[in-house]
Amino acid sequence: MKKREINSVRTPVYRDAGFELPTAGTTSGAFTAEADHEREPDLYIYSRYRNPTVVAAEEAIMAVEGSGWALLLQSGMAAIDTALSLFQDAGRQGTWLFFSEIYGGTLSYIGSILEKRRGVEVSFFRPSGGRYDYSHLERMIEDLRPDILFFETVSNPLLIVAEGRRIISMAKKRGARVIIDNTFATPLLWKPLDDGADLVIHSATKYLSGHGNLTAGVICGNDMTLMKSAIEYRKLVGHMLSPDDAYRLQTQMASFEVRFSRQCENASAIATILQLSGKTDRVLYPGLESHDTHVAARDLTGGKGYGAMITFDLSGSTPDEKRKRRDRFIEAVRPEIRLIPSLGDYHTILMPVEAVWGAKYPEPGMIRLSVGFERCDLLEEVIMRGLEA
């Protein structure tokens, strides 16, 4: 029976584990061509290699990122593992330089996998207060001559904004490859590949999907040699995203720019309310002129926005008092704002900093707020309810 062509504008969900190859000759040709690791093969073989639903979602991300290629993986950590593994060559002894203010999972990966299991020599560049000392960074790059430089555009949870273009220029002058985790800024605020970065990573779990109902990671780049190497690594270690998650991600990507723009607007309004409330010791939001890296954020993004994350410290005369006020705030804003260990969702969520980061940020009154795209007036009411509690 002849299959009907369905007049749908969406890519179907191809759940095939393996794809039909009609003859032995076709099979031989397909496997021979597979050695070239093209982004989209002429003939699909096996979904761990490439899947048409996943490829369609990758193309949606390429359009937003403006990249030559994008590869989806099953989590942000899988994207980090793949991106960093591309540069691990047997016998190579160069140093890798990481900013210290990066995602805790990445830091754990560096310690447990790169250093302990793979023997990579690692150094860290640390901030000076709430900003980075770029003269110090330049000296470190000059002394270490690192093979890799890795940083996040906006740090977590203190929201220190990096002078991305300046960092890329420093690293490139000394031959380093640059990998940037751009999850917090997203391609809407900055596209690092346009300024010479080698690879850009996103936890697509966050703003690219934006609904808190899937986990995914993506690597974007322009270098086709790196792409082929990444396809091979993803295939061999099994980091491929499922077609069902790819389908949902692609449909959610259609609203990404509208969602994230609204979230940035809401965050700007809420940050101002928190700052003027008289019930906070400090409010960290790059859009506020009081933020240590406000100028860096404005220059990097061209004023398009300052992100949708806010970190604020509730006032109090003692740590115990701050802790009690934090707990009352968390209880008072429920159920509209819930404590969920993630970010980027369409609804506003929060995390208590001390409870999550412990000794690294022992701030008992500090809360990280991931702002959603609810009606801002309703969100303001909930925040004020929490502050008044």
Image (cartoon, grey):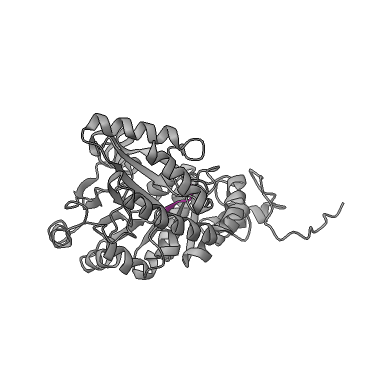
Residue at the image position 43 percent from the left and 44 percent from the top: 383
> Which residue is nearer to you in this view: 308 or 105?
308
- Residue 201 in view of the camera: no
Magenta span: predominant SS is: strand
* Image spot of residue 370 (x, y percent): 42, 47
Is residue 254 or residue 370 the one in the foreground?
A: 370
Q: Quadrant of residue 114?
A: top left
Q: Is residue 55 magenta?
A: no
- Residue 106 lies, in percent from the top left, at 33, 44
Residue at the spot 22% in from the left edge and 66% down from the top edge = 170
The span shown in magenta is 201-205
The vertical placement of 10 against 49, above or below, is below
Image side of residue 24 versus residue 100, left or right: right
Residue 280 at x, y percent in the picture: 29, 45
Q: Position of residue 4 (x, y in %)?
A: 83, 56
* Residue in the picture at 48% in, 48% down: 379
Observer able to see residue 200: yes
Depth check: give the residue in front, 114 or 367.
367
Count of labels shown? 0
The residue lying toward the viewer, choosing from 217 and 311, is: 311
In this picture, residue 186 sits left or right of residue 157? right
For the view shown, which residue lies furthest in the right direction? 1
Which part of the image, by quadrant, shows the C terminus?
top left
